[in-house]
Image (cartoon, rainbow, N blue to C red):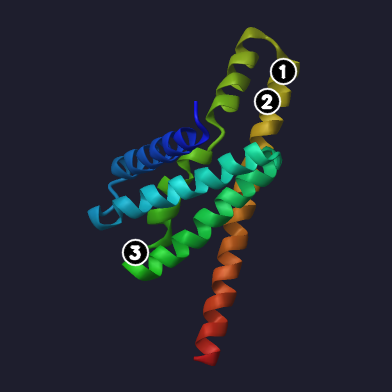
């Protein structure tokens, strides 16, 4: 498959996943498209990071950081809470497959594999949380500086 087609497919399905989850959360119609774009951009940072050899931790962190920053900008632009954009956008980054595999490994009794997978899920979740935390800190500092000097 050509590289450009892989990019289009990944962007499209990440956008659909984010908008689909936003619909289940009853996000306002004016914010749906932006939720999709935010989620797709975060996923593309993750996807490019994985293909560049950055690893899951760094790729998830940078994807969540971008989602957090875009969410803050969109919240100001569309006059909605940040969570309206961030919660649906994070769905493509959530490590669902390793979480499922961890539960499956526990059920069949493979505790060593389950422990490894749970640790992977935990580390990725912490990376996503740290990305959001850093985005929030950057946003607060930016708006505080902007308020003081303008």
User: Dividing the picture into quarters, in which one does residue 18 lie?
Assistant: top left
Q: Which mark is residue 80?
A: 3
Residue 30 sits above or below residue 148 on the image: above
Q: Position of residue 40 (x, y in %)?
A: 44, 45
Q: Which mark is residue 117?
A: 2
How many angstroms separate mark 3 from mark 1 (CA)?
42 Å
Element type where label 2 sits in the image: helix
Q: Position of residue 117 (x, y in %)?
A: 68, 25
User: Dividing the picture into quarters, in which one does residue 80 lie?
Assistant: bottom left
Closer-to-camera residue (60/40): 40
Closer-to-camera residue (21/4): 4
How many angstroms separate mark 2 from mark 3 (CA)?
36 Å
| Residue sitting at the far right | 112
Q: Residues within 10 Å of mark 2 (few under 14, many from 20)?
A: many
Earlier in the chain: of badge 2 and badge 3, it is: 3
In the picture of the structure, the residue carrying the numbered disc 1 is 113
What residue is drawn where x is 60% and y is 47%? 128
Image-based side of 63 in relation to 127, left or right: left
Earlier in the chain: of badge 3 and badge 1, it is: 3
Residue 92 sits above or below residue 147 on the image: above
Q: Residues within 10 Å of mark 3 (few under 14, many from 20)?
A: some
| Residue sitting at the far front | 2
Element type where label 3 sits in the image: loop
Contact between labelled residues 2 and 1, with CB atoms less than 8 Å apart: yes
Q: Position of residue 39 (x, y in %)?
A: 44, 47
What residue is drawn where x is 38% and y is 42%? 15
Closer-to-camera residue (25/33): 33
């Amino acid at each position: 498959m050509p590289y450009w087609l892989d990019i289009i497919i990944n962007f499209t399905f990440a956008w659909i996943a984010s908008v689909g989850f936003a619909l289940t959360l009853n996000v306002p119609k004016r914010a749906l498209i932006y939720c999709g774009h935010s989620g797709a951009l975060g996923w593309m940072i993750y996807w490019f990071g994985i293909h560049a050899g950055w690893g899951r931790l760094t790729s998830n962190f940078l994807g969540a950081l971008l989602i957090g920053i875009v969410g803050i900008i969109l919240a100001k632009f569309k006059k909605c809470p940040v969570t309206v954009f961030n919660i649906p956008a994070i769905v493509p980054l959530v490590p669902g497959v390793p979480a499922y595999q961890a539960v499956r490994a526990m059920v069949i009794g493979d505790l060593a594999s389950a422990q490894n997978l749970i640790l992977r899920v935990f580390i990725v979740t912490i990376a996503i949380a740290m990305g959001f935390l850093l985005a929030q800190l950057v946003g607060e500092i930016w708006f505080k500086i902007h308020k003081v000097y303008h």
